[in-house]
Image: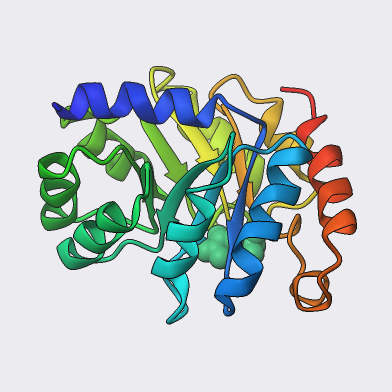
Amino acid sequence: MTPHQASLHAREIAGLAPIIPVLVVDDVAHARPLAEALVAGGLPALEVTLRTPAALDVIREMAKVPGGVVGAGTLLTPADVLAAKEAGAKFGVSPGATDKLLEACEAADLPLLPGVATASEAMRLLERGYDMLKFFPAEASGGAAALKAIGAPIPQVAFCPTGGVSIKNAPDYLGLPNVLCAGGSWVAPKEAVLAGDWSRIEQLAREAAALPR
Ligand code: 3PG
C-alpha cells in the first residue's frame, strides 16, 4: 500500500463517526463490553492506546466485536506497529511522526493518523502522501482557532484533533471544513469503565455520535 492509499483508508476510518474514542484500558475483561457499548452508541472506530500492559490483548478482544473498527494509539516505534498489526489493529494513531514509524506502517499496510501540531509538520507529511492527520495536542496547541489558521493555507489536509477535546468544545473543531472527526477519552470515563457502567458509556457515545459535522 502506498502512503497515498493508506491516507485514503485513514480518511474512510475518520469518516465513520464524529468522534474516535481514545481508550486506556487496564483490564482485558473490560475490552468486549466497552467496545460493544461504544459501537452500540454509534462510535465504531476505536483507538486503544498502547499505554497499558493489557493493550494488545484488549485490541485482540475488541477486534471480535461486530461493527467495530479497532486501531492502536500511541504508536511510537516500528515494534509497536508490528505488535498492533499482529493483534488485529485496522489503523494506527501516533502523537507525532518519524521516518521509521512511517516506513513501518507503510510496510505493514497499516493506515496511520500521524500527529502534527504545526504547518511544517503537516507539509512534510503531505509531501509524503499523508493528507489525513491528527492535530495533537489539540487544545494545548491553540485549539480550534489554531487548527483553522493552519488549515487555511493547506486545505487539502484533513485533521482529527485530539487532546483536550470534550463534548463542549468538539463542535468548535467539527465545524471547521478541514476536520473530519475528533478524538477524545471523555466517552469512556475511567470510573465508568471500572464500575462496568456500560449503559452510561453507551449514552456518552450516543451524544458524541450525534455531534454535527
Ligand atoms: C491522549 O493522547 O490521551 C489523547 O490525546 C486523548 O486526550 P484526552 O484525554 O484529552 O481526550
Which x, y percent locates residue 28?
Answer: 55, 73
* Residue lying at 39% horizontally and 67% vertically, measured from the top left: 56
Which x, y percent locates residue 41?
Answer: 79, 40
Of the pair 189 and 171, the residue shown nearer to us: 189
Task: Determine whether, in the image, residue 35 is placed left or right of residue 51.
Answer: right
Q: How many marks?
A: 0
Q: In the rendered image, which quarter is residue 98 located in?
A: bottom left
Task: Determine whether, in the image, residue 195 is placed left or right of residue 157.
Answer: right
What colouring method underlies this structural image?
rainbow
Q: Is residue 66 above or below residue 6?
A: below
* Residue lying at 10% horizontally and 43% vertically, measured from the top left: 107
* Residue lying at 58% horizontally and 27% vertically, measured from the top left: 16
Could one spot residue 116 in this view of the protein?
yes
Could one spot residue 164 in this view of the protein?
no
Task: Determine whether, in the image, residue 113 is placed left or right of residue 20.
Answer: left
Which x, y percent locates residue 199?
Answer: 89, 55
Q: Is residue 144 above or below residue 51?
A: above
Image quarter (top left, top right, bottom left or bottom right) of the N terminus: top left
Which x, y percent locates residue 84?
Answer: 31, 58
